[in-house]
Image (cartoon, rainbow, N blue to C red):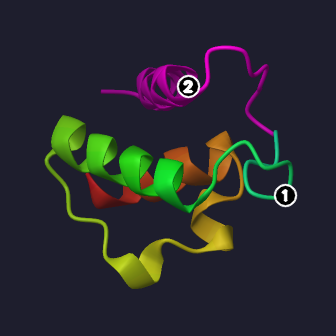
Amino acid sequence: MGVKEIEKKIMDIIKEINEEIEIDESTLLLEEEVLDSVSMLYLVTELENEYKIQIPLDAVTEDNFKNIDSIVKYVFSLI
């Protein structure tokens, strides 16, 4: 499982949340209000299920979930 595969999965999950949003790896997900608290929890749950990982609530920070790149790095570090 590579970085590009994780990146695609994250983008797919975000597209499930909002089909009409256009994002790339550097889109600021929280600042640009792509994700809110409910959609963030959905994303975390989907990532935990997909990759059989645990994401502690205190790790759901702007540093770890700022954009697709930061989420990929964080998820990859847990796998």
Give residue 26's quadrant in the image.
top right
**Between 75 and 10, the one nearer to me in the picture:** 10
Farthest residue to the right: give it: 32
Could you tell me how far apart the alpha carbons at marks 1 and 2 are, in whole angstroms? Answer: 17 Å
Residue drawn at 55 percent across, 62 percent down: 37
Mark 1 residue type: Glu
Q: Nearer the N terminus, badge 1 or badge 2?
A: 2
Label at residue 18: none
Q: Position of residue 62 (x, y in %)?
A: 67, 70
Label at residue 11: 2
Q: Which residues are magenta?
A: 1-26
Identify whether 10 is placed above or below 21. below
Which residue position holds label 1?
31
**Between 17 and 56, the one nearer to me in the picture:** 17
Farthest residue to the front: give it: 38
Q: How many marks?
A: 2
Q: Position of residue 23 (x, y in %)?
A: 77, 26
